């Protein structure tokens, strides 16, 4: 089947072209040292876009809610040191103007796929938007959420499959690999995979990442922490630096078999 994906440009990288783009970093920015250390690691092993949450939407209000605006200076400094484009989640339309100077991609989290006020606001900026699938969102609803952003003026939407809620409880979510193949065949939006939230278990991230790549994903977003047991959020699904390195080696093999390659850092 012909690839009809319209690529979305993030810095020097075109997401949705033949090259595969890897985004990686910690679930949350915790300190300058932690974010800088993680960024150096993921860059060394071949990630091209850096992730790091600043505003966290946590199920439990008693848990770490992210550093918020205190993380802005840290993110700015690490971006400068690594020259990597930066993706971070926006949780409120009022954050758009402040975040626009800092992020290269706005991430809309699973819990906000139906937040039409936020989607409309992101239509007014030209920055790319990574739209995660709501954990109870139909693919049809997800594609319509993407159209909200496009209709309001921003065509630069990248979809992200991050697992859905099913009757299965053995894993945090059920990664829907069907969605990857379906979106590639029935939509023009690029789609990347988040096997970290899709599985919720460190040991399952690599096999599911490889499956997503084989199914035609345009890239991955992976949570990595230098010391997962010390992470302030989602440590149970973070890859260690060593595991991330292994994933990148295996990923290259899978993509090579499909005549594709990983986008390399500049
Ligand atoms: C995240 O990326 O850290 C996150 C909160 O993801 P999701 O919105 O998919 O739960
Ligand atoms: Mn997370």
Image (cartoon, rainbow, N blue to C red):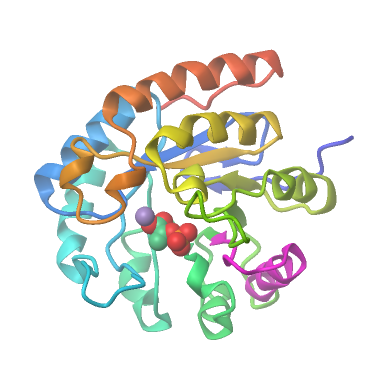
List x then y, in percent, for residue 228: 23, 41
- Outermost residue, right side: 1
Q: Is residue 234 visible?
A: yes
Asked if residue 238 lies left or right of residue 195, the reply is: left
User: How many badges with numbers are in the image?
Assistant: 0
Residue 252 vertical position relative to residue 164 in the rendered view, above or below: above
- Say if the magenta span includes residue 87: no
- Location of the N terminus by quadrant is top right
Q: Residue at x 33, y 70 (%)?
A: 58
Q: Position of residue 174 (x, y in %)?
A: 59, 51
The C terminus sits in image quarter: top left
**Is residue 104 among the parts visible in the rendering?**
no
Q: Seen in the image, is 227 located left or right of residue 159?
A: left
Left or right, 37 with respect to 16, comes to left
**The image quarter in which residue 25 lies:** top left
In the picture shown, does residue 158 fall above or below 95? above
Please name the residue shown 58% across and 74% down the image: 123
Point 73% across, 62% down: residue: 139
Task: Provide residue 135's location: percent of width, then percent of height.
Answer: 57, 65
Which secondary structure is most common in the magenta stretch? helix
- In magenta, the rendered stretch is 131-150
Q: Quadrant of residue 209?
A: top right
Spot occupied by residue 218 in the image (x, y as percentages of width and height): 63, 38
Quarter location, residue 166: bottom right
Choose between 244 and 11: the one closer to the eye.
Answer: 244
Query: Where's ligand 1: which quadrant?
Result: bottom left
């Amino acid at each position: 089947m012909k690839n009809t994906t319209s690529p979305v440009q993030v810095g020097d990288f075109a997401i949705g072209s033949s090259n595969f783009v890897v985004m990686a970093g910690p679930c949350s920015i915790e300190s300058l040292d932690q974010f800088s250390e993680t960024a150096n690691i993921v860059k060394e092993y071949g990630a091209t876009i850096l992730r790091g949450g600043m505003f966290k939407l946590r199920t439990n209000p008693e848990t770490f809610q992210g550093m918020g605006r205190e993380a802005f200076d840290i993110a700015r400094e690490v971006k400068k040191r690594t020259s990597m484009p930066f993706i971070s989640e926006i949780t409120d339309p009022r954050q758009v103007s402040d975040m626009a100077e800092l992020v290269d991609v706005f991430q809309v989290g699973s819990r906000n796929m139906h937040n039409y006020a936020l989607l409309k606001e992101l239509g007014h900026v030209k920055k790319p938007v990574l739209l995660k699938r709501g954990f109870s969102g139909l693919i049809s609803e997800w594609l319509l959420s993407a159209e909200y952003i496009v209709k309001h003026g921003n065509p630069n939407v990248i979809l992200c499959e991050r697992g859905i809620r099913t009757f299965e409880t053995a894993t945090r979510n059920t990664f829907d690999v069907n969605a990857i193949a379906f979106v590639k065949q029935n939509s023009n939006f690029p789609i990347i995979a988040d096997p970290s939230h899709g599985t919720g278990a460190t040991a399952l991230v690599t096999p599911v990442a490889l499956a997503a790549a084989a199914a035609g994903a345009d890239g991955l977003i992976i949570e990595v922490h230098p010391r997962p047991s010390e992470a302030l959020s989602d440590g149970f699904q973070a890859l260690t630096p060593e595991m991330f390195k292994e994933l990148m080696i295996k990923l290259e093999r899978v993509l090579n078999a499909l005549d594709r390659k990983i986008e390399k850092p500049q």
